[in-house]
Image (cartoon, grey):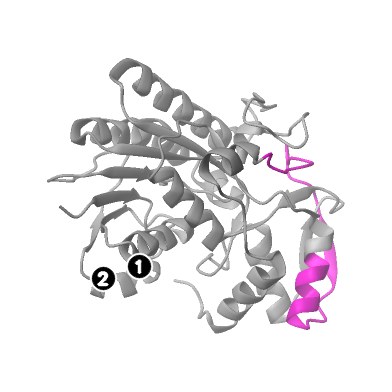
Amino acid sequence: MVERVVVTGGAGFLGSHLCEALLDTGREVLCVDNFVTGRPRNVEPLLQRDGFTLVRADVSEEIPVEGPVSAVFHLASPASPPDYLRLPLETLRVGSAGTLRALELARGKNARFVLASTSETYGDPLVHPQPETYWGNVNPVGPRSVYDEAKRFGEAATMAHRRTHGTNTAIVRIFNTFGPRMRPDDGRAIPTFISKALAGEPIPVSGDGRQTRSLCFVDDLVDALLRVLESDIEGPVNLGNPQEITMIGLAEWIRELTGSTSEIVFTPAMENDPKVRRPDIRLARRVLGWEPRSAVEDGLKRTIEWFGTEVIPE
């Protein structure tokens, strides 16, 4: 029997790449999305492929899936600061009610469940790089808490399900991932920097630009997710690129790669914006045999090329 995988948030940037990769392995894919931040265009090419089904639904309310399911990837959530600050209650609901519904689906189908958590569970870290054993430094009442705490709740719910019902679960903590299909207006650094550079407009860098992030190309991240699916790892496990870069350095790099003459301007720092971010991926290396293979510069070039052909978003 062909394996059938449910991907919540499957029309998003990362979700659409995962759906495509799952189809490439010969699996059937049921993509569930309400298109609050996901885009129909991300999965339009997949509608022509055998084994792909698209269901429009809010997983906080229901996950209408009939028939056998071998795995559930729960990716549904606003993921960029502008999106979750614009949709704070929706973000909390999908991280709580949505996660519980996805867990119940997996339990009822006797399926593997993979929670897409985030490096934001570490908050503004006091330990660097961040290992999975670090509990984090999160402001539970700050504006970013709607995302941070939603994901932390999701992790707690996943572990409670595993301990209480024996649900076959895994938690992955995803660090900054980039690539084609990111929304130009989603507010994260790479799409913002590229869009502005290509348009010849000022490139806005938050704060003093010395805060760091670690950038993983989407192909590598999807490879890691497939390995998690096929493993028995429980997690949490960090998935990301240990190569660290400052935001001012990233802006200058993108300006150079695009051949842009855009000036770099500094904007007020976001509240509780993490000063550093770099994953300790020793667990992923040991258990999954995984580490990023794509050079960041190659990934940036491919992303810039895609943005150069991207039409105005809906």
**Magenta stretch bounds:** 251-280
Q: Position of residue 154 (x, y in %)?
A: 45, 30
Q: Quadrant of residue 66?
A: top left
Q: Residue at x 31, y 63 (%)?
A: 23
Q: Residue at x 19, y 31 (%)?
A: 108
- Tags 1 and 2 in contact by the CB under 8 Å rule? yes
Q: Residue 237 versus residue 120: which sits nearer the camera?
A: 237
Q: Identify whether 38 is placed above or below 140.
A: below
Q: Residue at x 37, y 45 (%)?
A: 73
Q: Which residue is mark 2?
A: 47
Q: Quadrant of residue 40?
A: bottom left
Is residue 69 a member of the stretch shown in magenta? no
The reply, left or right, for residue 71 in relation to residue 11 is left
Q: Amino acid at mark 2?
A: Leu
> What SS does tag 1 mark?
helix
Residue 43, numbered label: 1
Neighbour class for label 2 at 10 Å: few (<14), some, many (≥20)? few
Q: Position of residue 196 (x, y in %)?
A: 70, 73
Alpha carbon of mark 1 to alpha carbon of mark 2: how far?
7 Å
Q: Position of residue 101 (x, y in %)?
A: 29, 33
Q: Identify whether 225 is placed above or below 255.
A: above
Q: Position of residue 236 (x, y in %)?
A: 53, 32
Which of the image's four quarters has the C terminus?
Answer: bottom left
> What SS does tag 2 mark?
helix
The reply, left or right, for residue 256 in relation to residue 179 is right
Q: Identify whether 204 is placed above or below 311.
A: above
Q: Residue 214 versus residue 153: which sits nearer the camera?
A: 214
